[in-house]
């Protein structure tokens, strides 16, 4: 549908990478997934027709969960920009990130792999 989301080959590559990371830590179950797609590559006609037909419905369905949040974020950004208080959004986002990170269990894996960094804009 778009270039932001991986196709089947991209999903398989991500899955293989996660399997490799788990295997390095003796946490993998089973053999690594195959990297080659099992589905045939869509034809050019299918790649053009899908967005024009089913793509609009897909986008409308996805918008019901994303659109309200995006509108809220845009409204907050505009309001803070008009008042000159945009820095408050950065502080709020950094606090939310810190709380989420601090809520993670403190395993040795997370201590090594989840950085304690400040957001930069």
Image: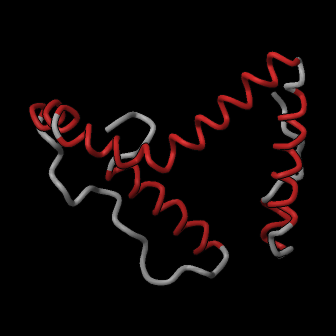
Quarter holding the N terminus? Answer: top left
**At 9% from the left edge and 32% from the top edge, which residue is drawn?**
45
**At 55% from the left edge and 79% from the top edge, which residue is drawn?**
28
By what rule are the colours in the image chosen? secondary structure
In the rendered view, tell whether residue 43 sits above or below residue 14: above
State left or right for residue 87 relative to residue 66. right
Total number of numbered discs in the rendering: 0
Nearest the camera: 74 or 121? 74
The quarter holding residue 104 reads bottom right
State left or right for residue 87 relative to residue 11. right
Q: Position of residue 37 (x, y in %)?
A: 26, 56
**At 60% from the left edge and 73% from the top edge, which residue is drawn?**
22
Nearest the camera: 117 or 61? 61
**At 48% from the left edge and 56% from the top edge, which residue is drawn?**
14
In the rendered view, tell whether residue 44 sits above or below residue 106: above
Q: Position of residue 68 (x, y in %)?
A: 55, 43
Nearest the camera: 6 or 51? 51
Q: Position of residue 111 (x, y in %)?
A: 86, 66
State left or right for residue 31 relative to residue 66. left
Quarter holding the C terminus? Answer: top right
State left or right for residue 54 relative to residue 3. left
The quarter holding residue 105 reads bottom right
């Amino acid at each position: 549908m778009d270039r932001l989301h991986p196709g089947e080959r991209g999903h398989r590559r991500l899955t293989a990478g996660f399997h490799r990371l788990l295997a390095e830590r003796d946490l993998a179950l089973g053999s690594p997934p195959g990297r080659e797609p099992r589905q045939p590559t869509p034809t050019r006609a299918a790649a053009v027709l899908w967005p024009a037909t089913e793509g609009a419905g897909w986008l409308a369905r996805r918008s019901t969960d994303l659109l309200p949040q995006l509108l809220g974020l845009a409204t907050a950004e505009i309001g803070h920009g008009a008042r000159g208080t945009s820095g408050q959004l950065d502080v709020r986002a950094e606090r939310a990130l810190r709380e989420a990170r601090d809520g993670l269990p403190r395993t040795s894996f997370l201590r090594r792999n989840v950085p304690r960094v400040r957001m930069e804009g």
